[in-house]
Image (spheres, rainbow, N blue to C red):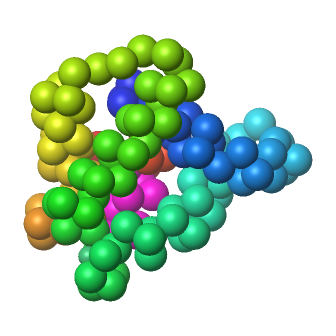
Amino acid sequence: MKFMMVCAVALFAASPALARQGDNAASGNQSQGASSVQSIVDSEFPAYDANQSGQLEQPEFIKWMVALKDQEMKATGKALPASEISAWASGAFTSADADGSGAVSKEELVKYLTGGSS
Ligand SMILES: [Ca+2]
């Protein structure tokens, strides 16, 4: 759960314009955050779906999560060892791949980042 929050925060840090958009729509309910994550995922997904399969295979997903973690570390000034980041990223892949298909769809990623499924 904590990691999901961290991811969402890192996403906002990576996309300040989208974060502001979310603020404008502030209504105090959860769908606000979810729709911001959705738009960020929509705009970033193609960049990380290197083979354009429409799904993020593990290396693609890990690349994205490492980039997010990188943003987070820059934002917080806390550095983590590379081994810890890659262990976290592969755990994140397993969690995000809710149906165990071996790839993370856009829907699964949004759910994972917003904590919409376990
Ligand atoms: Ca892919």
Task: Kindly identify the residue that appears in the image at 20 percent across and 29 percent down.
Answer: 82
Image height of 70 relative to 104, above or below = above
Q: Position of residue 14 (x, y in %)?
A: 59, 45
Q: Which quarter of the frame holds ligand 1?
A: bottom left
- Which residue of the protein is positioned furthest toward the right in this rendering? 24
Q: Is residue 25 left or right of residue 79?
A: right
- Give the residues drawn in magenta, as a range: 105-112
Verify whether residue 88 appears in magenta. Answer: no
Q: Farthest residue to the top: give it.
A: 78
Give the x, y percent position of residue 34.
Answer: 59, 52
**For residue 101, which quarter of the picture?**
bottom left
Characterize the magenta stretch by its predominant secondary structure: helix
* Residue found 65% across the figure and 49% down from its top: 15
Nearer to us in this view, 67 or 111:
67
* Location of residue 55 by image quarter: bottom left
Q: Position of residue 117 (x, y in %)?
A: 35, 49
Residue at 77% from the left image edge and 36% from the top image edge: 28
Q: Is residue 98 visible?
A: no
Please name whichever residue, 88 or 97, is drawn nearer the observer in this view of the structure: 88
The quarter of the picture where the C terminus appears is top left
Image coordinates of residue 63 in percent, x first then y, are 29, 54
Q: Is residue 71 visible?
A: yes
Q: Residue at x 22, y 41 (%)?
A: 89
Q: Is residue 33 left or right of residue 3?
A: right
Location of the N terminus (image quadrant)? top left
Lateral position of residue 47 relative to residue 84, left or right? right
In this rendered view, identify the residue nearer to me: 43 or 105.
43
**The stretch drawn in magenta includes residue 110:** yes
Image height of 45 relative to 28, above or below: below
Residue 32 is left or right of residue 117, and the answer is right
